């Protein structure tokens, strides 16, 4: 406390009082005083201006680096998208050729039907069919939306969270869906819906609101979903201001998943015909996808 | 009067010449600015108190800047640079505040 009191009370440099006392004793003022003062003040001005210029420069450098990084991110994402499109094209070409090759024999035709069914079930192939569309929208007026950076902190009460999306998707599966996609991202047995900061990631790709869950499934799916836990969960979300809509769609088209890869399984070199069917009908997509 | 002209001259020169600060000196610039402000406010208060002295002002300015930079430099070498800068800023900030309060009392007698 003494330190603080000293600091506040003796805030004026003691030198001034001493110099005043010396002057009072009759000591003549220093001869180069004015010059010294002017030089000193020029130095003060120079220091202040330099610091200001420095700060300004640094800010612009930071902004430049930031925009350069942002541009690089956009470039790479665009390149990624291009690669994914070419992958899609290559995959459909492979699928077409394989189909043509399989149709030559009757055994092949049977395998092809099996393969198509498996592709639909695992998410390796695009599917069409009737189903439902669930739209989830963040509560308005809580600082969320497309124009706000989803990674910044903020009021998250009325915001759709990754848990909400997980619950809804799980309930859609439970209601009998055969294929599900979130914002155009097809879900597979290995898909993850996670959060990074405030952004929701589906299979490690960020998705933006509004969140659209498309599900292909039997006619009873919508009723089962709305009357089951999913429906009541959406009701709870509505209490937080999250808007939702569940609609029928007679002609849904869900894309194939881009994220399917075999990591551990390898195809045996010689497949006994009996074992082959048993293997291809295994539910684990790791062992069945190409 | 000459003093004010000197200050303006310094600011203008700094803004137009934009002297490049060597990289090793850059971390000490902010702390030097705070120290300089402390000297300036001290000088202003002394002026209003009627005990201003040119030599004391210049010496206190130079010494303030050097000592503040030295403390931060030492802190950097010891690995407590940010804490010591905080300490310097707190001490000088309190001084600036109380000097500014004294100046305010002089000017507005309130």
Image (cartoon, helix red, strand yellow):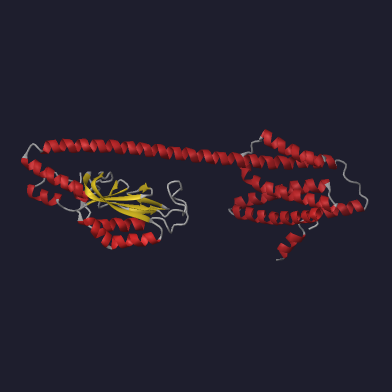
- Residue A160: x and y in percent read 38, 55
Q: Nearer the viewer, residue A93 or A1?
A: A93
- Residue A97: x and y in percent read 16, 35
Residue farthest toward the left in the current orientation of the protein:
A106
Residue A34 relative to residue A65: left or right:
right
* Residue appearing at x 17%, y 36% in the figure: A96
Residue farthest toward the bottom in the current orientation of the protein:
A1
Q: Quadrant of the C terminus of chain B?
A: bottom right
Report if residue A12 is visible in the image.
Answer: no
Q: Is residue B42 above or below residue A37?
A: below
Q: Nearer the viewer, residue B73 or B49?
A: B49
Residue B9 relative to residue A190: left or right:
right
Q: Is residue A98 above or below residue B28?
A: above
Residue farthest toward the top in the current orientation of the protein:
B17
* Residue appearing at x 39%, y 61% in the figure: A239
- Residue B100: x and y in percent read 75, 54
Report if residue A18 is visible in the image.
Answer: yes
* Residue appearing at x 22%, y 37% in the figure: A92
Rendering quarter of residue A115: top left
Residue A64 relative to residue A270: left or right:
right
Query: How many numbered markers are drawn?
Result: 0
* Residue appearing at x 79%, y 41% in the figure: B4
Q: Quadrant of the N terminus of chain B?
A: top right
- Residue B21: x and y in percent read 64, 38
Rendering quarter of residue A126: top left
Residue farthest toward the right in the current orientation of the protein:
A26
């Amino acid at each position: 406390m003494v330190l603080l009191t000293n600091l506040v009370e003796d805030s004026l440099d003691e030198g001034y009082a001493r110099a005043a006392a010396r002057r009072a004793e009759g000591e003549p003022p220093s001869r180069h005083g004015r010059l010294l003062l002017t030089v000193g003040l020029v130095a003060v001005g120079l220091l202040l201006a330099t610091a200001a210029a420095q700060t300004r420069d640094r800010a612009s450098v930071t902004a430049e680096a930031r925009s350069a990084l942002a541009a690089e991110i956009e470039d790479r994402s665009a390149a990624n998208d291009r690669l994914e499109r070419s992958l899609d094209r290559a995959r459909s070409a492979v699928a077409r050729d394989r189909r043509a090759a399989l149709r030559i024999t009757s055994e092949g035709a049977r395998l092809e039907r099996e393969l198509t069914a498996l592709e639909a079930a695992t998410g390796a192939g695009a599917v069409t069919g009737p189903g439902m569309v669930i739209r989830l929208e963040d509560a308005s007026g809580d600082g969320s939306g497309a124009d706000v950076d989803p990674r910044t902190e903020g009021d998250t009460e009325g915001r759709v969270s990754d848990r909400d999306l997980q619950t809804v998707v799980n309930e859609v599966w439970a209601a009998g869906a055969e294929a599900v996609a979130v914002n155009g991202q097809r879900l597979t047995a290995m898909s993850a819906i996670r959060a990074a900061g405030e952004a929701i990631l589906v299979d490690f790709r960020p998705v933006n609101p509004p969140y659209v869950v498309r599900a292909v499934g039997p006619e009873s799916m919508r009723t089962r979903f709305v009357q089951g836990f999913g429906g009541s969960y959406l009701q709870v979300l509505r209490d937080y201001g999250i808007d939702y809509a569940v609609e029928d769609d007679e002609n849904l088209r869900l894309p194939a998943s881009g994220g399917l890869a075999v990591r551990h399984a390898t195809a045996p070199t010689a497949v006994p015909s009996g074992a082959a069917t048993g293997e291809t009908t295994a539910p684990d997509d790791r062992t069945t996808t190409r | 009067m000459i003093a004010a002209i000197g200050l303006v001259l310094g600011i203008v020169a700094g803004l137009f010449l934009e002297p490049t600060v060597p990289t090793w000196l850059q971390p000490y610039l902010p702390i030097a600015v705070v120290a300089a402000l402390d000297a300036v406010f001290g000088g202003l208060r002394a002026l209003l108190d009627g005990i201003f002295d040119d030599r004391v002002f210049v010496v206190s300015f130079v010494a303030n800047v050097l000592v503040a930079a030295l403390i931060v430099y030492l802190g950097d070498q010891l690995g407590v640079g940010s804490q010591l800068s905080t300490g310097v800023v707190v001490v000088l900030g309190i001084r600036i505040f109380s000097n500014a309060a004294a100046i305010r009392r002089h000017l507005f007698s309130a």
